[in-house]
Image: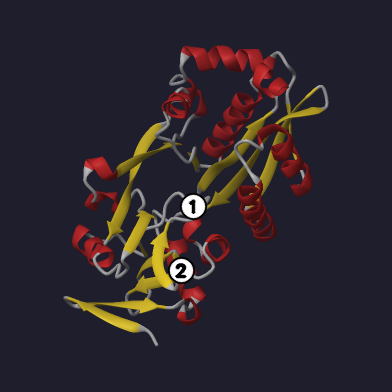
Amino acid sequence: MAKVLIKGKMKIIKLKHSEIDFEKYDKTLLECKWARVYAMSWYLDIVSPNWELLCDEDYNIVMPLPKKKKFGIPYLIQPMFCQQLGVFAKTEIDKNQIENFYKKLGYYFVIIHGNSFDSMIFSEDKLKPNYFISSKNFEEQQKLFSKNTIRNLKKADSFNHKIITIEIQEYFNFLTKEASNIYNEKLQNALRKIVKKSLDLGYGKLLATTVENEVSSVVFILDFNNRIYYLAPASSQKGKEARSMMFIINDLIKTSIEQGKIFDFEGSSLEGVERFYKSFGASCEYYGIFKKIL
């Protein structure tokens, strides 16, 4: 039975997975201006099969809860391949409403990520960066590229790259061969489920660059709610030499701008990765890390 948690005039309801109205829930996500693909029910069903939900009575405000159990004790932990969750709503909500939801996380152990909108409730030391490009003109965006990026793109052009779509098996064969130190078997198994489902739903695409008819880099992209996510990239040694990943990123930025969408790098606070994203003139937004350990 759903638990009703009353806070002021707003009733916050906690629902088990079996009690969630997924149609209403997803509708809220699709109407939310700061929605993230990671919070869609189909995505959560893969990365956190037993997720639960905090919501108001009409699903106008929702907060997915990535629940797991250890020794029979429930806890919340941010899943793999799931950068941002937090509070989502059909219309803009205020700081007090967001805080009410976070205060209702009744678990002894919680480590979850919020999103760029509900980051307003977090102190600066609890924030993590995410880099993105939101531009209306590709030529203007190119002016923000670093000198080093411009040089690398010129080098990439000299290799006569082509961008193609590839099948799931070819993508994972490439990850196994060229990036098994990053994507181990456990990560690949989880990623494979996300890729397959997103392709079935029409949100996902697997892209590759070729040099001399040989695949030199691959990337998985998700296109959701006017946002293109750059996920799980990898390059071969030849691809690194040919700057293949920079070539494909440049093309994705151009495509995103032409379609009026945000290009989301999906991270990162790692210095080298952060510098790489900034080199394309990316802007920064922040999301919070919520921790509670009793």
Q: Amino acid at mark 2?
A: Lys
- Horizontal and vertical percent position of residue 63: 37, 65
Name the residue that disc number 1 marks.
82
Which marked residue is nearer to the observer: mark 1 or mark 2? 2
Q: CA distance from mark 1 to mark 2?
A: 18 Å
Name the residue that disc number 2 marks.
69
Secondary structure, mark 2, is strand
Colour option used: secondary structure
User: Residue at image x 45%, y 49%?
Assistant: 83
Residue 165 left/right relative to 118: right
Please say if 176 is above or below 276. Answer: below
- Horizontal and vertical percent position of residue 261: 50, 43
Residue 128 left/right relative to 272: left
User: Residue at image x 42%, y 31%?
Assistant: 270
Residue closest to the eye, 79 or 259: 79
Quadrant showing the C terminus: bottom left
- Horizontal and vertical percent position of residue 16: 44, 78
Extreme residue toward the front, this view: 71
User: Residue at image x 47%, y 69%?
Assistant: 51
Extreme residue toward the right, this view: 213
Quadrant showing the N terminus: bottom left
Secondary structure, mark 1, is loop
Q: Amino acid at mark 1?
A: Cys
Residue closest to the eye, 87 or 139: 87
Using the rendered view, name the quadrant where residue 271 is placed: top left
- Can residue 64 be spotted in the picture? no
Please say if 263 is above or below 54. Answer: above
Of pointers 1 and 2, the one earlier in the residue sequence = 2
